[in-house]
Image: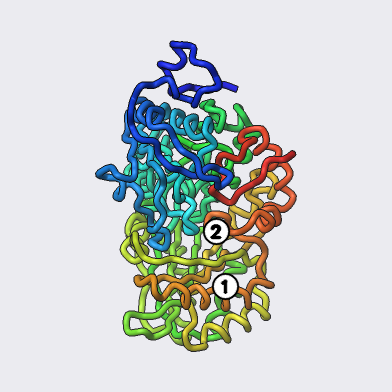
């Protein structure tokens, strides 16, 4: 196992292995209290922390440092109380490798932050080390090869903006300040995935820092086993410092819009029937929310990624549907819709979500949802429209199993006052448990589930993932994710 040490003075002097990892330093910095991967309290020697800081081209923040509180900020304010023992704000692959090795040698709990958008708060911890890649956000486009080289800490907006400058895109998500890393490694659902597949279906290569400190390239030709696991297996196998994506020629003006309807059983029936024959270019996603005055509505977003005249024909029936309150269709910039939710889903709010995949919108599911959505006090509920190109990839071609899903169903609480969290979470859970028997698995990026449910979610792909985990992270250093236990 290759390891890069941070104790240059100790190595030079040949200090005995029985001493602490950097115990030969004469630096008098105070030790730091921290938490191990096993949850035990440990002490990090101050000299070693100083040497780690000196090894970084980026910045190492201790809890007392100016800038620490800014660096630890996450998107989901529900986890704002968590305080890592230190934050390694990396600017290079070497910075990431040095940080990983520091943590691995000490059994230190590790979280990885790109965009910090982890809904269940896996980007942080109390007492661990946060490896913060937010400064590694390079975005380089090769228009001839139709590829994008994107830093591991980049946001989806960095990728969208760079690609659309060349009239090209790849699948990205629905909020532009989401990080590419967590988004991609979990699968990557977006507004054009029915045309081009998931983000992982467009991933050509990844540069990975493994738990052993190795820097490896994973692709179909090199370390193909790791490449298979990265595509849907989350952050279980290492820290990805660069992604290479396939790009597709794309008109930066799309056709569609937003229609607002009264909520009704008929609306759900029509949506289920409509999506059975919708072309891949059509993405139709209802959001059952409250208007600014508190009125329960169904806000439906439409995006057609192909010919505009065809899009007008495909979406025209919705304009005649009863219950429409407002809205119309027309051409608009793709970037506009990709950033349209950024202000609504902004940093610092309290977010809680339960979600699952719908393979078939059965009458029973529609009945349950209609009854709940028409009742007072229903939580926010949304559908992501999947299928299309996603379903034409075999379930064992990547770690991502749920290729047969027609929709991703989310039940969500969003608030601005932590005092309301308990009631909001209970409301989500009550709604979700009614629909859960009609769902099959879940999108790992969005859920905080135990190991048993993670095993079930990966199904027949799980044993292979566990073997990969044993190969690339046998000590389960990277455990703050939809965690896969190493095979024994």
Q: How crowded is mark 2: few (under 14 residues within 10 Å), some or many (20 or more)?
A: many
The front one of 111 and 409 is 111
Res. 403 visible in picture: no
Q: Where is residue 403 in the image (x, y as percent from the top left)?
A: 65, 55
Res. 118 visible in picture: yes
Q: How many labels does the image show?
A: 2
Which residue is at a point 46% across and 44% down the rendered structure image? Answer: 128
Position of residue 366 in the picture relative to residue 24 (left or right): right
Q: Position of residue 367 (x, y in %)?
A: 63, 83
What is the secondary structure assignment of the residue under circle 1?
helix
Residue 358 placement: quadrant: bottom right
Asked if the residue at tag 1 contacts the one at tag 2, i.e. Cβ–Cβ closer than 8 Å, the answer is no
The front one of 104 and 19 is 19
Of the two numbered discs 2 and 1 on the same chain, state the one appearing first in sequence.
Answer: 1
Q: How is the protein colored in the picture?
A: rainbow
Numbered circle sitting on residue 103: none
Locate the C terminus by quadrant: top right
Numbered circle sitting on residue 274: 1
The front one of 373 and 104 is 104
Which residue is at a point 67% across and 56% down the rendered structure image? Answer: 457
* Residues at marks 2 and 1, CA–CA distance in whole angstroms: 13 Å
Position of residue 178 in the picture relative to residue 470 (left or right): left
Which residue is at a point 38% across and 47% down the rendered structure image? Answer: 155
Q: How crowded is mark 1: few (under 14 residues within 10 Å), some or many (20 or more)?
A: some
What is the secondary structure assignment of the residue under circle 2?
loop
Direction left: furthest residue: 66
Q: Where is residue 203 in the image (x, y as percent from the top left)?
A: 52, 40
Q: Where is residue 186 in the image (x, y as percent from the top left)?
A: 55, 49
Locate the N terminus by quadrant: top right
Numbered circle sitting on residue 280: 2
Rendered view: 255 above or below 232: below
């Amino acid at each position: 196992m290759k390891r890069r040490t941070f104790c240059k003075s100790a190595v030079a002097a040949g200090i005995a292995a029985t001493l602490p990892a950097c115990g030969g330093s004469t630096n008098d910095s105070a030790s730091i209290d921290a938490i191990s991967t096993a949850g035990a309290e440990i002490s990090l020697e101050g000299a070693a922390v100083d040497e780690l800081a000196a090894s970084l081209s980026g910045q190492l923040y201790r809890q007392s440092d100016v800038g620490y509180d800014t660096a630890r900020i996450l998107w989901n304010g529900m986890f704002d109380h968590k305080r890592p023992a230190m934050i390694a704000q990396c600017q290079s692959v070497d910075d990431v490798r040095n940080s990983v090795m520091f943590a691995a040698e000490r059994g230190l709990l590790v979280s990885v932050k790109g965009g910090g958008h982890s809904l269940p708060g896996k980007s942080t911890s109390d007492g661990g080390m946060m490896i913060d890649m937010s400064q590694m956000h390079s975005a380089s486009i090769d228009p001839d090869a139709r590829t994008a080289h994107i830093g591991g800490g980049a946001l989806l907006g960095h990728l969208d903006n760079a690609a659309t400058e060349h009239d090209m895109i790849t699948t990205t998500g629905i909020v532009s300040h989401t990080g590419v890393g967590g988004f991609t490694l979990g699968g990557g659902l977006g507004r054009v995935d029915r045309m081009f597949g998931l983000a992982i279906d467009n991933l050509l290569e990844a540069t990975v820092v493994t738990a052993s400190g190795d820097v490896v390239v994973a692709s179909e030709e090199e370390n193909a086993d790791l490449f298979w696991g990265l595509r849907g297996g989350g952050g279980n196998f290492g820290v990805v410092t660069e992604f290479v994506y396939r790009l597709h020629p794309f008109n930066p003006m799309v056709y569609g819009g937003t229609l607002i309807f009264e909520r009704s059983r008929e609306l759900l029936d029509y949506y289920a029937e409509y999506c059975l024959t919708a072309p891949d270019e059509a993405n139709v996603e209802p959001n059952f929310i409250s208007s600014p005055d508190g009125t329960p509505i169904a806000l439906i977003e439409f995006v057609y990624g192909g010919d505009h005249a065809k899009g007008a024909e495909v979406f025209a029936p919705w304009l005649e549907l009863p219950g429409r309150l407002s809205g119309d269709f027309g051409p608009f910039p793709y970037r506009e819709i990709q950033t349209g939710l950024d202000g609504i889903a902004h940093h610092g709010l309290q977010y809680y979500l339960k979600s699952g995949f719908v393979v078939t919108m059965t009458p029973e599911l529609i009945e349950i949802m209609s009854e709940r959505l028409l009742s007072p006090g229903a939580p926010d509920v949304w559908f992501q429209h999947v299928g299309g190109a996603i379903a034409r990839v075999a379930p064992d071609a990547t770690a991502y199993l749920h290729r047969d899903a027609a929709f991703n169903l989310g039940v969500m609480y969003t608030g601005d006052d932590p005092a309301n969290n308990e009631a909001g979470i209970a409301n989500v859970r009550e709604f979700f448990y009614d629909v859960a028997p009609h769902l099959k698995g879940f999108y790992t990026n969005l859920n905080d589930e135990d190991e048993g449910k993670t095993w079930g979610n990966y199904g027949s792909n799980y044993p292979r993932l566990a073997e990969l985990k044993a190969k690339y992270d046998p000590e389960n250093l990277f455990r703050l994710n939809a965690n896969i236990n190493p095979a024994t």
